[in-house]
Image (cartoon, rainbow, N blue to C red):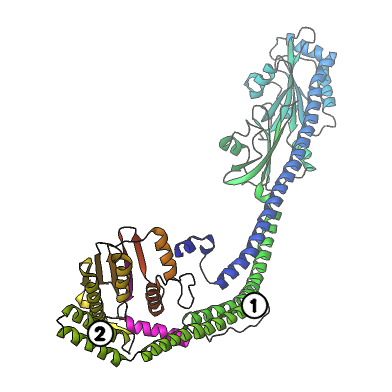
């Protein structure tokens, strides 16, 4: 039972009921609060990320569309010279002019300058528009002093791109042109095109439109942009066009190149870790220009409101938990106090104090339980006094009545007269049998305490055995194996004789050839083990089961079905030892048909004092 109780799931949490109730209350409060806070924070954070992702995607898309419009306008401007015959004629003239340096009249120069200036009119985002002839002469809308008249185009990095474009518009990422006279390191991005003869496709020159970086800044002016984030614009070759970082710690173009392949995989996850921090990356690529706009926003900046909500939730939860803990402690103490009192009273009752009562302070289930406990203790006290004490007194009265009906001296004198007559007649067997019967009668009806020494019990048993051997002759053999060290041990009177008698009448006597009875008395630990075994007739399993049920019936109950009195002596032995020493000291039986039977029982050493204390505690009800 103890093993089952330890393995039961409800017993895995050990502690007092008060602690269990307090823990339960706190868990019922803390767990829902924690789950609600975590779910709310998670939902709010996820929603914030999703809304920011959608909003940023719209912004990035709009930035790219604005860039597309500007780039398309620049591409359109780069086609304009091909529709002006005067410009084409000047470029043809310069292409066929082999002079070094090439010569062009002032009128034609002015015409080219005016034409280019008309293209850049009202376009503040344009730094300069340059038309370069095939022989190296350059025309621009800028002041002649700010631009070189002759340039070796093959040394320019962008030149190869334009030639490879073969007449198509080419968008050149941020660079520093070599044809400007000033030595500033200002960067520009450009739209350039190779100009070809409309009919023959013969190259006539190059038009290059340089745009200021402020153009993109103007596009971003009306676009909300987080201070903690950055914006990057690259082309299809992942070359940097533009980069804006409000915070130098925010990852930019170089970080994306070094730590990730995001520039090569625009459809990757929206969030990624950069420099040990989680960022939200949103990109959009233009189908017409091939430019890709990438927005990088730290997730922590998005979750500022979420973190504030989380801190507020934790604070409120902590306050609620403290208040709930106080209330839980109060209610746990109030609910468990009567149960603790009930437990203490039960311990007192367990030690035999049947006059204890529990105060009933409420009308709830605990109050009803206390009332039932008080009724139960009263009933136990009544039963102990009425059943145990009255039964003991009835047995004492019956024994006294029996002793008073037969005068001991009359019996002893009569047996002595018979003994003398047998001796005079020479019938010594009869004399021996009468003498043994006298000793047995004297031992049986003698008044005094209910305990004798083991030696006295064995002496009486020897007289009884001698009578039975005289009656049965060689058919009965009794062997006794007794530990002499325990001969002075007190045992209940008439404990062994009923066991031997049962073995004779139900085992040996019914066999034609008789049999043997073995009596063993030995010390085992702090107990005396008594065993009576015979090789008699034995019992079937059904008979043994019925005998066990008869022997186990309490002495204050009548066994009406046992009309022949079978097992009465064994039942009395079992009830006496159980009453004297407790439930652990009862009679054990085993038997097989045709193989004999064995009856054994244990009694504790120094059992007289223990038995008296046990009986007195039952009788007094304390």
Q: Outermost residue toward the top? A: 200
On screen, 604 above or below 420? above
Residue 489 versus residue 401: which sits nearer the camera?
401
Q: Is residue 459 visible?
A: yes
Residue 598 % position (x, y): 31, 65
Residue at image position (40%, 82%) is 614
Residue 295 versus residue 111: which sits nearer the camera?
295
User: What SS does tag 1 mark?
Assistant: helix
Q: Which mark is residue 458?
A: none
On screen, 280 above or below 101? below
Q: Is residue 183 left or right of residue 82?
A: left
On screen, 108 above or below 18? above
Residue at image position (39%, 62%) is 544
Residue 323 % position (x, y): 66, 71
Q: Which residues are magenta?
A: 599-622
Q: Is residue 14 left or right of residue 237?
A: left
Residue 316 % position (x, y): 68, 65
Q: Is residue 529 magenta?
A: no
Residue at image position (63%, 31%) is 265
User: What SS does tag 2 mark?
Assistant: helix
Residue at image position (47%, 61%) is 4
Q: Nearer the viewer, mark 2 or mark 1?
A: 2
Residue 552 versus residue 276: which sits nearer the camera?
552
Q: Looking at the image, is mark 2 or mark 1 earlier in the sequence?
A: 1
Q: Please identify the quarter of the rendering in which residue 279 is found.
A: top right
Residue that carries the numbered disc 1 in the rendered image:
368
Q: Which mark is residue 438?
A: 2
Residue 283 % position (x, y): 70, 36
Q: Is residue 606 magenta?
A: yes
Q: CA distance from mark 2 to mark 1?
A: 63 Å
Crowding at dot 2, Cα within 10 Å, few <14 / some 14-19 / many 20+, comes out as many
Q: Please identify the quarter of the rendering in which residue 117 is found.
A: top right
């Amino acid at each position: 039972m103890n093993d089952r109780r330890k393995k039961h799931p409800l017993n895995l949490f050990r502690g007092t009921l008060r602690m269990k109730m307090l823990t339960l209350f706190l868990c019922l409060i803390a767990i829902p609060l924690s789950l609600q806070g975590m779910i709310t924070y998670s939902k709010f954070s996820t929603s914030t990320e999703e809304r920011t992702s959608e909003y940023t995607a719209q912004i990035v898309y709009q930035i790219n569309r604005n860039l597309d419009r500007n780039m398309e306008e620049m591409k359109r401007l780069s086609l304009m010279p091909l529709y002006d015959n005067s410009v084409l004629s000047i470029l043809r003239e310069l292409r066929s002019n082999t002079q070094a340096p090439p010569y062009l009249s002032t009128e034609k120069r002015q015409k080219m300058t005016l034409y280019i200036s008309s293209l850049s009119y009202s376009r503040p985002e344009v730094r300069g528009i340059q038309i370069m002839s095939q022989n190296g002469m350059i025309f621009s809308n800028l002041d002649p002093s700010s631009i070189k008249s002759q340039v070796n185009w093959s040394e320019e990095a962008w030149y190869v791109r334009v030639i490879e474009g073969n007449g198509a518009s080419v968008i050149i990422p941020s660079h520093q042109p070599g044809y400007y006279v000033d030595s500033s390191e200002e960067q520009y991005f450009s739209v350039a095109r190779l100009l070809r003869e409309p009919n023959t496709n013969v190259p006539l020159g190059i038009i290059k439109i340089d745009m200021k970086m402020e153009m993109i800044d103007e596009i971003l002016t009306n676009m909300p942009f987080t201070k903690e984030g950055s914006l990057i614009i690259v082309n299809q070759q992942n070359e940097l066009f533009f980069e804006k970082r409000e915070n130098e710690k925010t990852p930019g173009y170089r970080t994306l190149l070094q730590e990730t392949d995001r520039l090569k995989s625009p459809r990757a996850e929206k969030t990624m870790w950069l420099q040990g921090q989680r960022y939200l990356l949103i990109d959009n690529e233009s189908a017409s220009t091939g430019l890709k706009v990438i927005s990088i926003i730290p997730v922590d900046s998005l979750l500022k409101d979420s973190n504030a909500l989380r801190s507020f939730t934790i604070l409120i939860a902590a306050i609620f938990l403290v208040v709930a803990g106080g209330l839980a402690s109060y209610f746990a103490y109030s609910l468990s106090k009567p149960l603790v009192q009930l437990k203490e009273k039960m311990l007192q009752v367990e030690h035999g104090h049947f006059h204890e009562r529990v105060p009933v302070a409420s009308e709830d289930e605990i109050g009803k339980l206390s009332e039932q406990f008080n009724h139960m203790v009263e009933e136990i006290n009544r039963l102990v006094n009425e059943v145990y004490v009255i039964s003991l007194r009835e047995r004492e009265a019956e024994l006294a009545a029996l002793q008073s009906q037969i005068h001991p001296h009359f019996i002893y004198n009569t047996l002595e007269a018979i003994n003398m007559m047998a001796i005079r007649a020479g019938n010594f067997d009869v004399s021996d049998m009468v003498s043994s019967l006298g000793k047995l009668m004297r031992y049986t009806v003698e008044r005094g305490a209910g305990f004798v020494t083991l030696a006295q019990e064995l002496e009486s048993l020897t007289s009884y055995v001698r009578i039975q051997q005289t009656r049965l002759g060689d058919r009965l053999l009794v062997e006794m194996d007794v530990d002499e060290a325990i001969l002075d041990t007190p045992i209940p009177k008439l404990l062994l004789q009923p066991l031997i008698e049962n073995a004779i009448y139900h085992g040996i006597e019914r066999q034609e050839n008789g049999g043997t009875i073995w009596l063993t008395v030995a010390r085992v630990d702090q107990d005396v083990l008594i065993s009576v075994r015979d090789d008699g007739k034995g019992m079937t399993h059904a008979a043994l089961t019925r005998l066990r049920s008869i022997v186990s019936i309490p002495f204050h109950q009548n066994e009406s079905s046992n009309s022949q009195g079978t097992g009465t002596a064994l039942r009395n032995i079992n009830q006496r030892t159980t009453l004297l020493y407790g439930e652990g000291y009862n009679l054990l039986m085993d038997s097989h048909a045709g193989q004999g039977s064995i009856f054994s029982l244990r009694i504790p050493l120094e059992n007289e004092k223990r038995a008296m204390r046990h009986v007195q505690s039952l009788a007094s009800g304390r």
